[in-house]
Amino acid sequence: MEAAPQRHELSPGTRREAVGMHKASKSFAWIGRELNKNPDTIRKTWYRYQQRHNANSAPCSGRPKKLDECAWQHLKQYITETRDQRRKPLVEISNILNLNVHPQTLRKELVDMGLGHRIERKRPYLSPKQKEACLKFAKEHIHWTEEDWRRVGFTDEMGLQTGANQGNIWVWRYPEEEYDEDCCAATHKSGFKKIKVWGAIRYDVLSKLVLLSEKKGEGKFTSQNYVDEVMDKELFDFWMSSMEEVGDILIMEDGVGYHQGAATRRRKEYEKDGWTGWGPGTWPANSPDLNPIENL
């Protein structure tokens, strides 16, 4: 059974061949049979050749984009302008900018810009002064070697508490903006605590975990409590065992209030026996990127 003539566009070589045959006085029907093409396609190819002296197909512009260049730039500027605008739903963005496009179309445009819809990261809130202190500390210790850091004991307390799960917040951002302030949720230390623990680490070594006493009806945990329950017990043992293993070490303590007062006086007494460290006023506040125990 003879195959049906093909109706789709001719290849460049076939177009030239069809034009040559018609110049030689061959009919469109005859050419169609010879090339197994639809005679109407041969006819259109010939008329195109007569009009343009070229049998090539006219360039196709394709489907026009829903957003023109001006709207595209406006959308890009609007999304990245403020914290709130990075978090708006696509339908609301489309309405505000009067774009009149489907949310899926808008999502595709944003992805084409390089913006991804991702869950916002959380990081501690830092004041300008705290940022300056973190940067200064990092610059001062940027050339420390692994051997230097092996001699640092990091300490910290952690409060465990109940709280509402607010779920994940989605934000439009570029990959390199993962920790930009506009793309992160600021975390703040809560005053409500159920239980509190203390611990210390250094290279390949963990202290015992100390469960700090609750102070229901007796006021807050004080510097004297810190001395009695931590400094003169597990922290002292951790310091002494570290000294025996690697020699002089630095004990890192953050700037929480009960690390001062009576704790400061006890450090001065320990300094006579070789205590050195980064205490309150030395260690930058809210610096989990500098303090590995925060991640632990």
Image: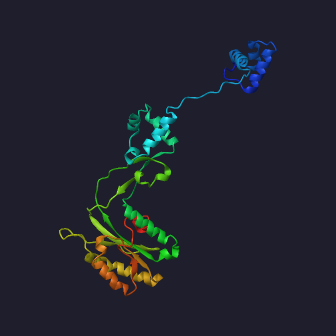
Q: Is residue 103 left or right of residue 59?
A: left
Q: In terms of depth relative to the viewer, which is nearer, 126 or 57? A: 126
Kindly tell me whether residue 120 is visible in this rendering.
no
Is residue 176 toward the left or the right of residue 49 in the image? Answer: left
Looking at this view, is 268 or 4 the one in front? 268
Residue appearing at x 62%, y 27% in the figure: 60
What is the x, y in percent for residue 64?
54, 29
Q: Residue at x 41, y 51 (%)?
A: 182
**Colour scheme of this structure image?**
rainbow
Tell me where residue 21 sits by quadrant: top right
State the image coordinates of residue 57 (x, y, percent, origin top left).
68, 24
Quarter of the figure that contains the C terminus: bottom left
Q: Could you tell me how many numbered marks the image carries?
A: 0
View extreme (left): residue: 217
Compare residues 28 and 262 and report the one nearer the observer: 262
- Quarter of the picture containing the N terminus is top right
Q: Relative to residue 180, is residue 217 depicted above or below?
A: below
Farthest right residue in view: 24
Closer-to-camera residue (216/176): 176
Determine whether 273 is above or below 98 in the image: below
Q: Is residue 256 above or below residue 79?
A: below
On the question of residue 264 being in view, the answer is yes
Picture coordinates of residue 111 (x, y %)? 50, 42
